[in-house]
Image (spheres, grey):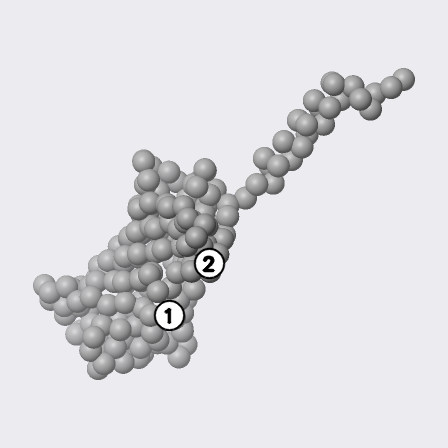
Amino acid sequence: MKIANSPKIHLILAGFVALSLATTATAATWSVDKAHTEVNFSVKHFFTPVNGSFGKWDIDLQYDAEDPEKSTVTATIDIASVTTGNETRDNDLRSGNWFEIETYPTMTFKSTKVEKVGDNKLVAHGVLSIKGHEQEIELAIAHLGTKQIPAEMQPMLRGSKQVASFEASTSIDRGDYEVGVGNWAATVVVGDKVDITILLEAHQR
């Protein structure tokens, strides 16, 4: 009995191949462009917002443009890289009064689920860890756009074939992480709510 050239057998085999490719497909790795990415925060001093940022961090972005809910994001931030434009304040933030960087040098965020909530709108659910305290948070993400890179420009961008940009934001209560709760000045003068904004540009090669 000959079956090797049977059209039905070919059709079945093609189906198995397609199913295998579909089930093994994963979100693509995007390289974060550090020159065009910012990790910023804002907190009130009495009634005046004070802005700051972190200059050193690592972000791992697995982004699936076709099915964004398969995406993941993990971030590790070097707290010693904090800057608010005032050296005395920055050193105080690094001290035991606030972040205790000698004991807790980094803060981390790891997504557990990404949810699509609208056109170009996502929410990354995950765990934020600061000073050994973990809290589940929601990171609202706006996909600002994706652009294909023309072939003639790709060598200039180290082989990048496309670029995508995102803006992510959330608000946390610093007291949940015991940041700045050791004296009356920290708890009375500085606001509890901290707004965090991440502007991210990433490239896929």
Where's residue 153, x and y in %? 41, 54
- Name the side, left or right, on which 62 lies relative to 90: right
Where's residue 138, x and y in %? 34, 49
Position above or below: 7 against 64: above
Seen from this angle, which residue lies furthest left?
47
* Quadrant location of the N terminus in the rendered image: top right
- Name the side, left or right, on which 204 lies relative to 197: right
Position above or below: 9 against 18: above
Q: Which residue is mark 2?
A: 155
Report the front residue among 187 and 121.
121
Mark 1 residue type: Lys
Where's residue 2, x and y in %? 87, 19
SS category of the residue bearing label 2 = loop
Residue 145 in sight from this viewpoint:
yes
| Label 1 Cα neighbours within 10 Å, binned few <14 / some 14-19 / many ≥20 | some
Residue occupying the point 20% across, 78% down: 86
Report the front residue among 13 and 76.
13
Mark 2 residue type: Pro
Q: How many marks?
A: 2
Residue 31 in sight from this viewpoint:
no
Q: Which residue is mark 1?
A: 56
